[in-house]
Amino acid sequence: MSLDAAVEAIRSFEYWPEIATGTLDTLTMTGLSLGFTVLIGLPVGVALFLTGPSQRSERRLTGRAQAAVYSSLSLLVNILRSLPFLILLILMIPTTRWIVGTSLGVAGSIPPLVVGAAPFFARLVENLLREVDRGVFEAFRAMGASTRQTVFWALLPETLPGLVAAITVTAIALIGYSAMSGVIGGGGLGDLAVRYGYQRFNIPVMVVTVAVLIVLVQVVQALGDRWVAHLSHQR
Amino acid sequence: MIETRGVGKTYYTPTAEFQALQNVDLAVSAGEVFGIIGRSGAGKSTLLRTLNLLERPSTGRILIDGADVTDLDGEPLRRLRQRIGIIFQHFNLLKSRTVHENVRLPLRINAELDRSAQDGRVAELLDLVGLTGNARKYPAQLSGGERQRVGIARALANRPQILLCDEATSALDPETTQSILELLLDINRKLKLTIVLITHGMDVIRTVADRVAILDRGRIVESGEVVEVFLNPRHEVTRALLAQSGVESDAVVGIDEDDRPILRLTYHGMTSEQPLLSRLSAQTGLDFTILQASVGHLKSIPYGRFTLRLPASGRGRLPDLLQLADELGVRHEVLR
């Protein structure tokens, strides 16, 4: 294909408005669900860590209570993570309707996206916190800090670059998931690809959709990397 | 000030149990520097950590200022810990916070001062440890010695009466170790701070400690004034630790097997002011050879220790020599 032909192909492509709307919808879905994912996943990750094997109290009763909370949370997280996202989407339709009033469009895809991504993010957070130097905990315990102070003044600030990297990874996973929610009428670029590309064999729409997704992922990753580099540079 | 009564600590694994501490009795007085020394695995760190209940003893009691704190929990335990400073081998500073913020943390936790008073206190502390001008730096920008100074400033923030040192100089080079030890002595005097430190190095003990306890396999095998323990070690572990630091060398090796008498003289304190050897020689008319000698200071107390060989003909006059030594306040031991 010559350059002229390519320019002509782009000019004659009649679905730019749909692509623009789809991109905007994908960004909205990803952004909102990322926000809720962090809001839910971060406390769950912290809870997993605080009740996890490395933080067990020497006191028998407290230790057992911790173990019980850890096992239940861990089981829940594992169950949600073992469901293929497409299945989760379908299973959640009644719940989604109950929460946002519809299972369709941008709003309808946010609850399943959050439920799919939050357990993943929670595990990432738990693993990050396990990497924090044990000495830092010891110092905080020895200073007489409460658990709350230890979490907010030591754990989260010490893992901030790692948290930003984990948020980036989750954002990219959400872009992928949000495209999948198009299959059951979720809106966004995935919806476009399914309706035009798959059901109407419109190859150009498919190609443009894929290209936009690739660019989105690249941009998100690059932004995340720069933020992490900035945070790590300070210390 | 700090007392442990019959403290024991047992760790359980699914297959075995391990007694890290057994029946440890300690009494640390206010204002002293108390050293605990032992080989690695002897239980030093566990013992130190029972004092602020980072480790809870399996048996026995911990008393701070006469109050039994062994079962404290929750808020009262946090309040107690705020009154006990601790510094660590690896400093345990927050990498994400500046020096100023690291030192301010205990003040934020304690929450008795308002923000500006906290900032003022931090400046005061950085001045005390000689780090003025480094407030805005991050720990990564500091040397090991400077990081430990930050650790010390942080430990002292809430004006504790007790400072625990967990191998505080073990990660530092000898020169830096010396400067940190001097700083510890300085704050011990200035702030009348009681210091308990654990170490595997005798040099640390001889530089700063007033009293010492030797820990071996979870038990205290010997304890007392540093001078006493150094000059008259009774337990083999003490001797081994001393030999490593070059103070004590018991072996009278490479010496001819004959019947010339060999004796050891030790003294410390005021006695050191006198010309002991020349007086002994002049008054008994004996010539002797010095086989081995060590003189110096333990903290601020001068001491001396000599291994002497007398001529074969000198054995007859040995009782006179020993009697004179007694009069001069010199301890003696006939080795051969």
Image (tube, coloured by chain):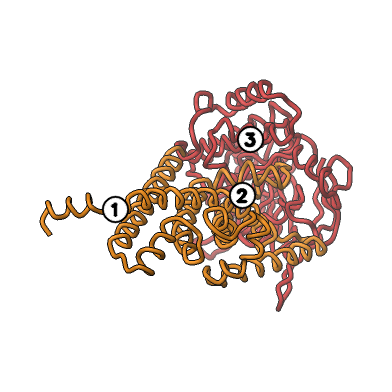
Chain colours: A orange, B red
Determine the CA span between mark 2 and mark 3. Answer: 33 Å
Residue A17, image x, y percentages: 36, 48
Which numbered disc covers residue A39? 2
Residues at marks 1 and 3 on the same chain: no
Determine the CA span between mark 1 and mark 3. Answer: 67 Å
Residue annotated with mark 1: A14
Residue A170, image x, y percentages: 49, 56
Residue B249, image x, y percentages: 57, 55
Q: Are marks 2 and 3 in contact (CB under 8 Å)?
A: no
The chain identifier of the residue carrying mark 3 reads: B
Q: Quadrant of residue A96?
A: bottom right
Quadrant where the N terminus of chain A is found in the figure: bottom left
Q: Residues within 10 Å of mark 3 (few under 14, many from 20)?
A: many
Q: Are marks 1 and 3 in contact (CB under 8 Å)?
A: no
Inspect the image, locate mark 1, and give the three-letter code of the amino acid beneath it.
Answer: Glu
Q: Nearer the viewer, residue B258 or A217?
A: A217
Inspect the image, locate mark 2, and give the three-letter code of the amino acid beneath it.
Answer: Leu
Residues at marks 1 and 2 on the same chain: yes
Front position among marks 2 and 3 = 2
Determine the CA span between mark 1 and mark 2. Answer: 39 Å
Q: Is residue B12 left or right of residue A182?
A: right
Q: Are marks 1 and 2 in contact (CB under 8 Å)?
A: no
Which numbered disc covers residue B154? 3
